[in-house]
């Protein structure tokens, strides 16, 4: 009954995981630069810009709230990852 839709979701998830890993590796480069330059991990201005930017890519504006929610979580995880990465780097 749901096979076709779940196969599509599985394909999308595979792509998302690949992109998530690529984003996270890039965030590690950001962490390295921030550590070297004594910069704060949190950049609220940049986070607001990221959310506005991704919302502008939507074809369906009714998803704006959910997309903001998704990105707030992605960037919260990103900050946590940077923190972890910096702690390991310094130990
Ligand atoms: O662009 C940065 O300065 C980052 O650290 C990356 C990132 C993100 O994941 O997009 C994470 C934390 C910051 O608060 C802003 C954005």
Image (cartoon, rainbow, N blue to C red):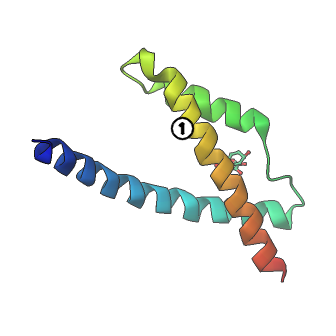
Q: Image quarter for residue 39?
A: bottom right
Of residues 48 and 37, the one nearer the viewer is 48
Q: Position of residue 29 (x, y in %)?
A: 66, 64
Vertical arrangement, residue 53 with respect to residue 80, above or below: above
Asked if residue 46 lies left or right of residue 55, the reply is right
Quadrant into which the C terminus falls: bottom right
Q: For the residue carrying disc 1, how many other residues have a C-alpha within 10 Å: few (<14), some (14-19), or many (20+)?
A: few
Q: Is residue 15 left or right of residue 42?
A: left
Q: How many marks?
A: 1
Q: Could you tell me which residue is drawn at 68 percent across and 47 percent down? A: 76
Q: For the point 48% across and 61% down, which residue is it? A: 22
Extreme-top residue of the structure: 62
Kindly give the residue lying farthest to the right in the view shown: 38
Indicate the secondary structure of the residue bearing disc 1.
helix
Q: Which residue position holds label 1? A: 70
Q: Is residue 65 above or below residue 74?
A: above
Q: Residue furthest front?
A: 1
Residue at 69%, 37% (x, y): give it. 47
If the image is split into quadrants, where does the N terminus sit? Answer: top left
Picture quadrant where residue 15 is located: bottom left
Give the residue drawn at x 26%, y 53%.
10
Q: Position of residue 51 (x, y in %)?
A: 60, 31
Residue at the limit of the structure toward the bottom, as seen here: 91
Q: Position of residue 87 (x, y in %)?
A: 80, 73
Q: Nearer the viewer, residue 13 or 53?
A: 13
Residue 87 in the figure: left or right of residue 58: right
């Amino acid at each position: 009954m749901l096979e076709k839709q779940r196969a599509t979701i599985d394909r999308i998830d595979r792509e998302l995981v690949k992109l998530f890993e690529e984003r996270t590796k890039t965030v590690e480069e950001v962490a390295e630069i921030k550590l070297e330059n004594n910069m704060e991990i949190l950049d609220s201005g940049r986070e607001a810009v990221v959310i506005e930017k991704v919302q502008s890519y939507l074809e369906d504006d009714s998803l704006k709230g959910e997309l903001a929610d998704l990105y707030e979580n992605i960037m919260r995880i990103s900050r946590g990852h940077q923190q972890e990465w910096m702690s390991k780097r310094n130990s």
